[in-house]
Image (cartoon, rainbow, N blue to C red):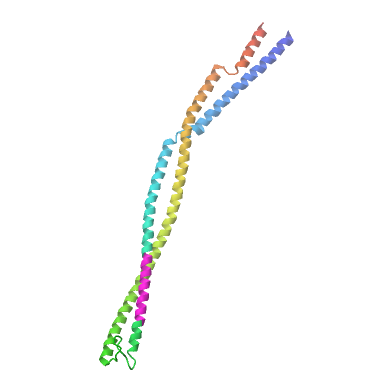
Amino acid sequence: AALEAARLERQMSSLRESIADQQGRLSGQISHLEAAISTDIEPKAGRVYELEKGLQAATAEQAELKTAEATLAGLREAAQGLSAKVQYLGDSSATLLKEMEETRKKFDMLGEDEAVCPLCQQPLGDEGQEHLTLEYEAQGKEAKLKYQQNTEEEERTKRERSELLAQISRQETELDRRRRETEAKIANGERDLAESHQARADLADSVKRVDDLKKLLESGEFASEERTRLAGLDTEMAS
């Protein structure tokens, strides 16, 4: 009888240990879920409004970048206009220089012994030579003045274009930086917002799971097979 009682006691002890193990596992699951809820799921679920506002701000910033891009396009167009002006002034100066050279040649020809009229090719008298000399001098001075004015304006335009190109370069660099930052904000915001919405769904499921596990633990309805066998052994021991 003593041996039988010892055998039964060993079985009952093993069953109690099994029930205790299952109870511990349930408590561990509850603790793990509660920790996940408080440290991860709940904080993520609570960020939906914050993330939506951040995403709206990033989207608005993206719209502002389009305005900045349009402004930059206007500056590029202005720079192209200045380049065209530099080209025009350079061409005009080259034409004036050629005109001055031709006028100089005509002026030098008047000093020859048998100077002729450039139109009728007839010999010029003293009065004709004097008239053409004054005319060529006037033409030369006017062309020289225009050439100097063109050259000065060309240099001013080149400086203006250089300053504008430097401004464009700075704004392009800044715009590229802002564009990359904004694109990253939107991509990260969309990802985090999706995670936050998922966390809301997970939160409801996790809270329900914790409640179910707590009810199961409190009711003692876990390890039903072990409890049934333990009750049978209790009855056997009592008989």
Report how many numbered discs are placed on residues in the image. 0
Question: What secondary structure predominates along the stretch shown in magenta?
Answer: helix
The residue located at (44%, 47%) in the rendering is 182
Q: Is residue 46 left or right of residue 100?
A: right
Residue 137 in the image: above or below residue 180: below
Q: Is residue 122 magenta?
A: no
Residue 238 in the image: above or below residue 53: above
Residue 132, given in percent of the width and then of the height, sits at 28, 86
Query: Which of 184/70 is in front?
Result: 70
Specify start and end residues of the magenta stretch as a single range.
Answer: 82-101
Residue 51, given in percent of the width and then of the height, sits at 43, 39
What residue occupies the far bottom of the structure in this picture?
A: 113
Quadrant containing the N terminus is top right
Residue 122 position by quadrant: bottom left
The residue located at (62%, 13%) in the rendering is 228
Quadrant containing the C terminus is top right
Residue 63 in the image: above or below residue 138: above
Residue 150, given in percent of the width and then of the height, sits at 34, 73
Residue 9, given in percent of the width and then of the height, sits at 69, 13
Residue 147 position by quadrant: bottom left
What residue occupies the far top of the structure in this picture?
A: 239
Q: Is residue 83 magenta?
A: yes
Residue 13 position by quadrant: top right
Query: Which of 143/127 is in front?
Result: 127
The residue located at (28%, 84%) in the rendering is 135
